[in-house]
């Protein structure tokens, strides 16, 4: 395990803009942020990407994505005005087409996410960067100020999903949501909490500007609906929530590990093209709807400033490089495959019906994730086993599944760690309640 002092951090790491912006956070553990293999890949990846692209190329790509995002919505709005005025009787049919287009237009809003990783200079143009900071919340429902706090912690401490349950740095979604369409009053709570903003390195002035813009947007939705129109609701707000749900669900699949550091166990690699079985379905769907988040997210952790479009273009070569050179790489695998391996091994090859069922279960998991990122008090990992193979429920008993669950958490000393925790987070309490219930069930039915 790499344990380095601040002065010993390699240049490849200290050069990251987001780290420089977040390193003063009082809870950041600078001693255990990455393992040696991941560090080696970080150095190689930075050298490899800059043999073909410069930082100015990165900035040009982000400017292009922002232009496509704004231009795309202008085109959608003009199309909507024409169709709504001339063909309202066919609104269902042209509405479906516009909604599908909107799902892909919103993906260019990824530039708001990338602003977190390039707080000093994202696009190479100062006023554009400032506009992203001020209008990111009404444009995407995601506050650059608040999302930066959440996302930087997710990049530098407690990377694996299991480590986040015990984390003092990572914040659960019920405390700080990803978007604020469902709980807009939460923004005011953060704004008026000076201690929170100071502790979490949040600029209150920037947050105030974002809030004014966001409340103006919410008011515009209400006014539009009151006049019998629905563009902002159907073709902007809902697609944005779909994207947020997909991105978080993709991230928790990629981080379905135990390691608190950045490693190839906590940052898994995925490729729906090579995945076998029913798990291929959610990997394909979430990659399609989430700007390739499933396939780029683990690599993204190695150099967060690289535009995701470049990783999407080259991810298969990068995966191959990692698989050939490093050990213990988690590839197309999540925790429940380890936890319930004895049950999954019983399953025969799936048929067409199983793939169809998995598609709808993938949509269900996406809906649950959308609710989670809006602030619901349950983790987005709870349907992981159904995404891997729902048929395990047919070939196993509840007692068998509960036994696997208890055995897994006993190896991690869940009971002892919960008793020692001074302030267990929401997901820690959620897991512990399930642990207690299942343990009691096994005792009663032994």
Image: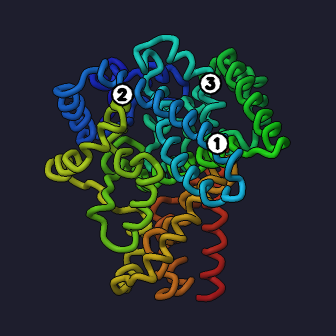
Q: Which residue is mark 1?
A: 82
Q: Nearer the viewer, residue 360 or 85?
A: 85
**Callout 2: SS:** helix
Numbered tag placed on residue 61 in the rendering: 2
Q: Nearer the viewer, residue 149 or 157?
A: 149
Mark 2: few/some/many CA within 10 Å (<14, 14-19, 20+):
many
Q: Nearer the viewer, residue 333 or 266?
A: 333
In the displayed structure image, the side of residue 388 where residue 183 appears, left or right: right
> Residue 52: image x %, image y %?
18, 28
> Do residues under tags 2 and 1 come within 8 Å of each other at their CB atoms?
no
> Residue 397: image x %, image y %?
53, 87
Query: In front: mark 2 or mark 1?
Result: 1
Q: Earlier in the sequence, mark 2 or mark 1?
A: 2
Is the residue 293 above or below the residue 349 in the image?
above
> Residue 326: image x %, image y %?
19, 49
For image coordinates 50% across by 77% down, the residue present is 357
Distance (Cα) linking label 3 and label 1: 27 Å
Which quadrant does the N terminus fall into?
A: top left
Numbered tag placed on residue 135 in the rendering: 3
In the displayed structure image, the side of residue 251 where residue 296 appears, left or right: left
Colour basis: rainbow
In the displayed structure image, the side of residue 13 where residue 92 appears, left or right: right
């Amino acid at each position: 395990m790499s344990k380095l002092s601040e002065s010993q951090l390699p240049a490849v790491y200290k050069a990251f803009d987001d780290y420089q912006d977040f390193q003063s956070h009082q809870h950041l553990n600078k001693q255990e942020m990455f393992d040696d293999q991941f560090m080696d890949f970080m150095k190689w990846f930075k050298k490899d990407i800059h043999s073909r692209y410069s930082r100015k190329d990165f900035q040009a790509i982000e400017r292009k994505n922002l232009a496509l995002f704004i231009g795309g919505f202008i085109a959608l709005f003009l199309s909507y005005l024409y169709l709504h005025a001339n063909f309202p009787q066919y609104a269902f049919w042209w509405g479906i087409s516009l909604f599908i287009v909107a799902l892909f237009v919103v993906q260019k809003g990824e530039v708001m996410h990338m602003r977190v990783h390039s707080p000093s200079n994202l696009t190479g143009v100062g006023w554009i960067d400032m506009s992203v900071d001020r209008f990111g919340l009404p444009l995407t429902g995601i506050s650059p100020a608040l999302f930066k706090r959440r996302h930087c912690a997710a990049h530098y401490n407690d990377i694996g999903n299991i480590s986040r349950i015990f984390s003092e740095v990572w914040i659960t979604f019920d405390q700080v949501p990803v978007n604020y369409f469902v709980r807009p009053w939460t923004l005011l709570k953060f704004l008026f909490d000076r201690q929170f903003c100071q502790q979490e390195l949040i600029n209150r002035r920037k947050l105030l500007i974002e809030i004014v813009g966001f409340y103006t947007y919410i008011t515009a939705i209400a006014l539009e609906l009151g006049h019998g129109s629905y563009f902002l609701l159907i073709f902007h707000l809902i697609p944005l929530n779909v994207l947020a749900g997909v991105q978080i669900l993709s991230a928790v699949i990629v981080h379905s590990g135990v390691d608190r550091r950045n490693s190839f166990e906590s940052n898994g690699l995925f490729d729906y093209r090579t995945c076998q079985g029913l798990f291929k379905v959610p990997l394909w769907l979430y990659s399609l709807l989430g700007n390739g988040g499933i396939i780029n997210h683990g690599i993204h952790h190695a150099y967060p400033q690289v535009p995701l479009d470049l990783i999407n273009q080259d991810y298969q070569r990068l995966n191959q490089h990692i698989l050939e050179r490093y050990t213990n790489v988690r590839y197309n695998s999540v925790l429940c495959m380890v936890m319930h391996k004895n049950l999954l091994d019983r399953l025969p090859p799936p048929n067409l019906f199983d793939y169809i069922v998995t598609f709808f279960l993938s949509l269900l998991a996406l809906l649950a994730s959308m609710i989670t990122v809006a602030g619901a008090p349950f983790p987005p990992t709870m349907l992981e086993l159904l995404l891997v193979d729902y048929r395990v429920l047919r070939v196993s008993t509840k007692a068998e599944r509960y036994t696997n669950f208890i055995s897994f958490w006993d190896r991690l000393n869940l009971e002892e760690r919960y008793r020692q925790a001074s302030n267990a987070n929401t997901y820690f309490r959620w897991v512990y309640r399930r642990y207690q219930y299942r343990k009691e069930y096994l005792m009663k039915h032994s």
